[in-house]
Amino acid sequence: MKRVLNKLYQHPSPARYLLGKAINRLGLFSYPTRIRLNAEARPQYAYCIYHSARLAQSLGRESMSVIEFGIAGGNGLINAEYHAKRAESETGVRIEVYGFDTGGGLPSPRDYRDLPYVWRSGFYKMDRKRLERSLTRAKLILGDVRETVAATFKPGVAPVGCIFHDLDYYSSTIASFAVFDIDTSLRLPRIYNYFDDIIGDEARLYNDFTGERLAIREYNATHESRKIAKCYQFDDVARFPWHSQIFIHHDFEHPEYVKYIGKSDLQNPLEA
């Protein structure tokens, strides 16, 4: 009950939150409509996976990859599998799911940038055997992301279109950004990203000089033609808390960045 009350307190419209829960429980409306109504489980996962699949479809890609950096017990990875299956049905794009983690919980923080007043070594340990029994399509990639990202994404793997960042630390997050350095054939020109640890409570006090926010700032400062940018498409709709956690990785020099994906013919003739 306390968790539900906290959700209601944090939500800009408690009534819409409860309505979304009811729609999801009753299975009302189509999958894309439930995403628009914030009525899917982990709506941020639903939004990013579905819309990245639509982008892949528009680009003529037959497949794409979804990544979760930081798995913990595996609830998010299982949810990503569910949404990957639904997005496949809607778009026809085959979706591969990859989960990256140490497998042993958080390592020791390196310095103040890893927020040691929030995180401690050993948090979020994984029951690997139990999780593997629960997965239906996701591949677990265990080890240091400094090594596992480059080793995983090689020719033959579906291009990356969507990433969920939950490594908590600045040091781990900036290391995982190596995924943006893989060959352009292995990533879409625009990649949907969800950052779990950029908004929080009065104890966490996330800021632009530590954690995931610092990793984003440093990446943008050191890459002239690639940027991790906010999503302004949420500015003209009723906002939900997770909207501020969605970013798009833009690669302006990607061969497909300028490929037209809109409608075939747009006109606005003079009215009588």
Image (cartoon, rainbow, N blue to C red):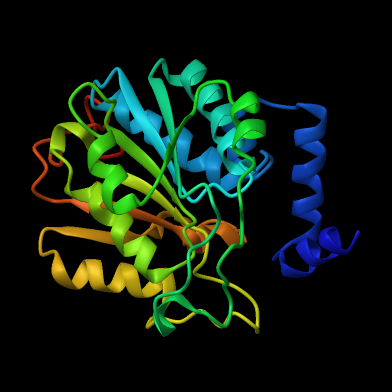
Is 33 placed above or below 170 here?
A: above
Residue 59 position, x and y percent, is: 23, 27
The quadrant where residue 3 appears: bottom right
Q: Does residue 170 appear in the picture of this structure?
A: yes
Q: Residue at x 69, y 41 (%)?
A: 39
Q: Residue at x 26, y 32 (%)?
A: 262
Q: Looking at this view, is 108 or 237 the one in front? A: 108
Q: Looking at this view, is 175 or 165 the one in front? A: 175
The quadrant where residue 32 appears: top right
Q: Residue at x 49, y 51 (%)?
A: 70
Q: Residue at x 13, y 38 (%)?
A: 183
Q: Is residue 223 left or right of residue 210?
A: left
Q: Is residue 129 left or right of residue 65?
A: right
Q: Does residue 268 appear in the picture of this structure?
A: no
Q: Looking at this view, is 144 or 216 the one in front? A: 144
Is 228 placed above or below 33 here?
A: below
Residue 248 position, x and y percent, is: 33, 53
